[in-house]
Image (cartoon, grey):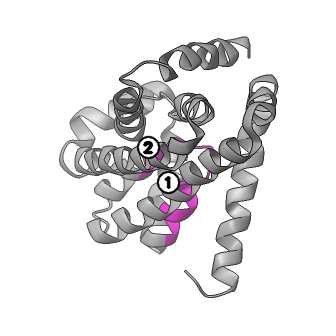
Amino acid sequence: MKWLVKVYDKALIWSQHRHAPRYLAVVSFVDASVFPLSPYFMLAPMSLAKPHKAMQYAFIATMSSVIGGVLGYLLGYLVFNPIILPIIKFMGYTEQFGLIAQRFQENEFWTTLAAGFMPIPYKFVAISAGLMQASMLTFISASILSRGLKFFLLSWMIKIGGLKMEHMIRSSIEKFGLILVALLLSVVLALKLFGVI
């Protein structure tokens, strides 16, 4: 998928812009609520360009993503049938969406937490939470934890690894995504094992 590399290269240019933190906030918000535009492509090069601000960038991405998730929640709660359902059907995600909604009936917190790490659109999690009328407090707290761990871990890895890590990301960007998911799941399992969450 060469287009992923092209998007990443474009994000490198955006990351140098003086309004890059604002762009990151917008991308994170939109990705979490209505449109598939991953913030990782901006967060990684921004963290590389200014390692001393890497954690600040992770915070911006986390908070913007959670706020976008709240919009997704409201869309699921208020306008699912007339607006959201036709879009989900058009995109061919009916089955995946149904599985997420079913999981919400079983456990709201763990569904949000786990789905925040999975390679599925987070917006589906947010919309499902609204549709199933999940507790807003539960949804927000689980979203902050899952999205925060994901973004902060990525920024930390870039900050520590520097150019070597950035080159690795660029050359194997899809594999890196799978590795990141595996690492984050390991962190969550470890936290659960030790009773932290």
The answer to whether 117 appears left or right of 102 in the picture is right
Q: Are marks 2 and 1 in contact (CB under 8 Å)?
A: yes
Q: Sort mark 2 into few (<14), some (14-19) or many (20+) by Cα contacts within 10 Å.
A: many
Q: Nearer the viewer, residue 61 or 76?
A: 61
Q: Residue at x 27, y 65 (%)?
A: 136
Q: Which residue is mark 2?
A: 61
| Magenta part, dominant SS | helix
Q: Sort mark 1 into few (<14), some (14-19) or many (20+) by Cα contacts within 10 Å.
A: many
Q: Quadrant of residue 48?
A: top right
Q: Quadrant of residue 143?
A: bottom left
Instruction: Determine if the magenta segment contains residue 120.
Output: yes
Q: Quadrant of residue 144?
A: bottom left
Q: Residue at x 50, y 54 (%)?
A: 147
Marks 2/1: CA–CA distance: 8 Å
Q: Which residue is mark 1?
A: 147
Picture coordinates of residue 22, whole percent (x, y): 34, 30
Q: Residue furthest front?
A: 52
